[in-house]
Amino acid sequence: MVQAVLKATSSLDSQRHARMEVLKEKVEEEEAAEREEAAERAERGEKTKRPMEVRRGETTMTQEMLRDLERKLSEIEVSVPEKILTFTKDTIDTSKLPLSYQSNTLKEEHLLQVADNFSRQYSHLCPDRVPLFLHPLNECEVPKFVSTTIRPTLMPYPELYNWDTCAQFISDFLSMVPLPDPLKPPLYLYSSTTVLKYQKGNCFDFSTLLCSMLIGAGYDAYCVNGYGSRDLCYMDLTREVCPLTMKPKETVKEEEKAPPKKYAIKPPRDLTSRFEQEQEMKRQEAIKAEEENRRKQEEARLLEQENAKTDPLHGLRVHSWVLVLSGKREVPESFFIDPFTARSYSTQDDHFLGIESLWNHKNYWVNMQDCWNCCKELVFDLGDPVRWEYLLLGTDKPFLSLTEEEDEGMNDDDDVENLGKEDEDKSFDMPPSWVEQIEISPEAFETRCPNGKKVIQYKRAKLEKWAPYLNNNGLVCRLTTYEDLELHSYKSMQPEMDRVMEFYETARVDGLIKREETPKTMTEYYHGRPDFLSYRHVNFGPRMKKLALNSAESNPRPMVKITERFFRNPAKPADEDVAERVFLIAEERIQLRYHCRSDHITANKREFLRRMEVDSKGNKIIMTPDMCISFEVEPMEHTKKLLYQYEAMMKLKNEEKLSRHQAWESELEVLEILKLREEEEEAHTLTISIYDTKRNEKSKEYREAMERVLHEEHLRQVEAQLDYLAPFLAQLPPGEKLTRWQAVRLKEECLNDFKQRLIDKANLIQARFEKETQELQKKQQWYQENQVTLTPEDEDLYLSYCSQAMFRIRILEQRLSRHKELAPLKYLALEEKLYKDPRLVELLKVFV
Amino acid sequence: MNRLYDMEPRVMDDEMLKLAVGEQGPREEAGQLAKQEGILFKDVLSLQLDFQNILRIDNLWQFESLQKLQLDNNIIEKIEGLENLTHLVWLDLSFNNIEAIEGLDTLVNLEDLSLFNNRISKIDSLDALVKLQVLSLGNNHIGNLMNVIYLRRFKALRTLSLSGNPVAEDEDYKMFICAYLPDLVYLDFRRLDDHMKELAEMKHQYSIDELKHRENLVQARLEDEQARREELEEHKAAFVEQLNGTFLFDSMYTEDVEGSKLSHLPGVGELLEFTYKDKFVIICLNIFEYGLKQQEKRKAELDNFMECVQEAIQENQEQGKLKIAKFEEKHLLSLNAIREESELSNIEAKIVQYSEDITELFNVLMTLEMQLMEQLEETINMFERNIIDLVGLFVENVQSLYPFLEDPLGRHSCLARPWLNSGCTMAQCRDLENHHHEKLLEIAINILEKIVKGEMDEDLPDDVRSLFVDKDTIVNAVGASHDIHLLKIDNREDELVTRVNSWCTHLLDKIHKDEIMRNRKRVKEINQYIDHVQSELDSLECGDLLD
């Protein structure tokens, strides 16, 4: 029976059969097991169509089958995941689609037959494998071979020339719809034009479109039908780190160690006991190990938290992606592109669990390699017919020479019979794509995402993208990163919150670089100040009084502590140059720390206390030695004097006041900046390029004005060509030549008519004028009669009526006078025009 | 100026000064403090002693830090007693009876000097006042306008007053000053405008140009001299000064009476001039160059050593600072904790804990210092060995005790020292001298023979001829000349060797001493700091006990 089938098909098939036979023979021992499995399957009433399976006497059992079985078994327990939005053909208007969509050409029909034949043989020879995804229905319910759905197109946008930007565009442009059944390839595969129109699709739509564009751009790209991880199938990036947050690895520059100098000091002698060291090391190691252990546990816990429980459908989920083979467009190594996320993966990646088949616009290949270890061991040498079963002969892939003798033998049997057919078959190539030219309008290209908006959830990050000009503040991309996995709100524009502001120090008089705020503190960093201030840290206490409106302006928070640090002032000796001063305002204490001299390791310190103001006898104490505690590295005489200390303290008190004032001013400045920022943020206007004619309002207005002017010009021309004589000429019998008398009469009539019209118009204006005047008079009369009884509202009404009526009257007056002025001119103009009229000129010339 | 003669002249005694200081000291609260403590004269910054009828400036030596001194409206006749007031910036001696400017040579910081209304007739003796900005010499007896040129040396001078002097009567007075002092801004309390300056410059252009030329020449000469001095210093530092010429050779003949006589002999002059002198000078030059090279080497060695020592010290200091900073952080916390603790037993425990911390800090710092000291000692010893080797090599090579031998470190080859091939040692000088001596002797004996034989046709000077009395005389004369030459060479050699050795000894002494000083200072510093911290703790304890 097998032979019969083979004979009916081409010799190609016989070759293929021969190869499959080899495969079969290897595992024939497992027949029994297979039979059992078949029975089991029958019991379950499995839905999968395997037309040839029953007829096939002997079946094979491979490793893959076992996995398949396992897969099938696990499938039973699983409930179908809830349906998310689907993309069905009901929503598509098929009536307007071109003919190629609605029917098949002869060649396509032939191809479908070939494909069917191939499919039959395939399922006959490999009954354990799922049916091939060969010719799904398109939007018009017409079966179309997958390869013809690929329409290689080179896009006119330079941005789409490279694979990464191209994939990114598709991932942005289309919104993802999961497969109706996650375990099977879809029944429908729509044309890319339809997909682009509706901007949504499943993984097959994505990869078909991407493949079309990549092949168009010159890549050696293929659509893959295979199995992917759950994350891949549902475009779930929540377990991925956002690529934008990944920082480029800092290249740690090894500090070049200068060669040890001749007189470099020797390190101090190591006098510690080696035994003790070892013991210590052991102890440290134990502690470390324990810590490591704990850390690992913690990590595992976190990981568990992060990773959802393992997927029960692992390895069964159907996914489609794109394979780019090396060789063309300088691609050094083959890789996968997931069309949903536009990320490239190596062919070894864990997310890709197996490949059934792959195709491009020219051919279709079935994977004959075992996918037990995901895609890690697959060899993408499509010319190798043992690994990749092709559908059509005559691809550009090189064939491997068949070395096995039996292949040759098998071939010989059929050679004679099928010689002619083989030739015919060989010449058969893929019919052109039925899909219309893929086009993306510039607007759509710019808008990118459906509705111009896209949100991607990453692990601890959220990426939002918008089309240009969609947000009136010009926002096009926002990345929010989170510390942990929960959601947060943030308030940055409130005063007295955590905030860091950075400044251009050169643009500021006070040399401020950075101001950091927390609810209780404010830290400022300075550079390049004449007083050498480098740092000021202010601690705030709670507000004294609770006011309804607390702000730095009306009710400033009390300052508890001000810490100021200074750079070294080279003009002063180090031990008189203050390095840090701390005003403990609440404790009335001032601490000073001086800079350290270059040959010292300790620095001067001084602390002033101002607590006791009155001594036991009630006398005011000005200064006592215990009010100033100082440590001096090299004691000096003059600093011991109370007078010196008193003067220093007085100076410090003034400076404290100044510092407080400056801190207060800083707070005010923060408020001011925040206010300004808010205003700025509210009042955004995007500057639009003058070449952007669609968005630039000004140029649009200008263009419209130009159009209007043109239109008016046109109208005027039409008017100018208005034929005054036409109605009068129409009264005369057509086709006859005018007599002079007729011509004169015609002219007279025309002029009279015009005169009459002018008079009528004047009368009309006059009549209206009189009517208005009368009405006004009436109204006035009425008003005078009823003036006493009128309510203020009525009076208002009356007054407004009056002013309006007066306005109308005035206008009518003006129009009348203008009409009177213009009427004779118009009359004369018409007369002159009539004299010059080519139809009358001959006749009137003599008359004149 | 005689207005105060009716009063008794007063003496500047302690009482007067004290009174003035007290009156002019701080006011109010600060004043009370000052009174309470008393003010030391050496802390006073400003002193006003006008209308005191002082005749003689005296008793001011204690006011070391005085910056402003007013002695106007007295009857002082001589500027004196101001030598100690080196910080003085402002000095007012107006309305006195001073006749000459003097006694200001130590006041290098003086910026403002007023000698208004005195009897000065000449501007001079102000050379030390390099920062002078304001000079008031009005109402004096200065009569020579050319005297103003003296003021050209004060580059910072901006204000000058000379009104009321005889010179101010000169019609060219203003122009002249403008022209000769172009940087002046105010003359007699009036601003000099640019137009005026231009006019003045044009008027006196020729004389000023000449003056400038002369000044430039002087300046150039000074610079030249300076450069030469520096070069000589450099050579001296290399111990080979004046070996780069004929100096040594010439000095050999300056005291050599016989030698100069002998040089008149026929053939000797050529020998001296063309063979001997040239060779000798070349050898000297070689020694000179070798000396400079060696000096560079020694300098590099010393710099390297100093750099390493500095680095080591710096690193050690950083460590110490880090330790102290850490301690201080803790220290503040523990002090506060002790202050706030109410339980007595806890306080004691904390105090004990704190004392232990202090002791530990002390130990750590001292260990660091000890470590550094040991390390430095080792390094210094190594340097000492190397530098002594270097000096030894230099001396040996110059003396040529081991002629043409490589230095012990074996770093050089003969190719790298081409001067050795042509000779560069004192020994070679001596050889040359010996050779010359032999030749000279030969010539002398030849001539003697000729004279004895009466074949001598050339005419010899009498004093030369007197040498050729007999063989002994001439041999003695030649020998004496030779001895003198050798002595000179020996002296030069000895000088070089002694100086280089003493330099080495001094250097090493200084390094050792500096290190000891550094160590002592650091130990003192550590002790002081620890004492301070400890005393803070003690005072806290006392306070607690009192509470």
Image (spheres, coloured by chain):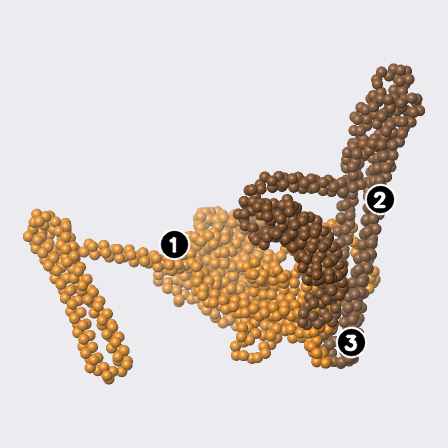
Chain colours: A orange, B brown
Dot in front, 1 or 2: 2
Give me the chain letter of mark 1.
A
**Label 2 CA crowd tier, 10 Å (few <14, some 14–19, many 20+):** some
**For mark 1, what is the residue?**
A106
Left or right: A790 with respect to A577? Answer: left
Nearest to the observer: residue A103 or residue A474: A474
Vertical position of residue B159 compared to residue B235: above or below: below
**Gap in angstroms between the C-alphas marked 1 and 2:** 113 Å
User: Between marks 3 and 1, how big is the CA–CA gap?
Assistant: 109 Å
* Viewer-nearest residue: A165 or A383: A165
Q: Where residue A530 appears, x then y in whole percent?
A: 61, 60
- Which residue is identified by label 2? B501
Q: For numbered disc 1, what is the local secondary structure?
A: helix
Subunit of label 3:
B
Other residues around mark 1 within 10 Å, as few (<14) / some (14–19) / many (≥20): few
Name the residue located 46 percent from the left edge and 67 percent from the top edge: A682
Q: Considering only vertical position in the picture, is B140 above or below B453?
A: below
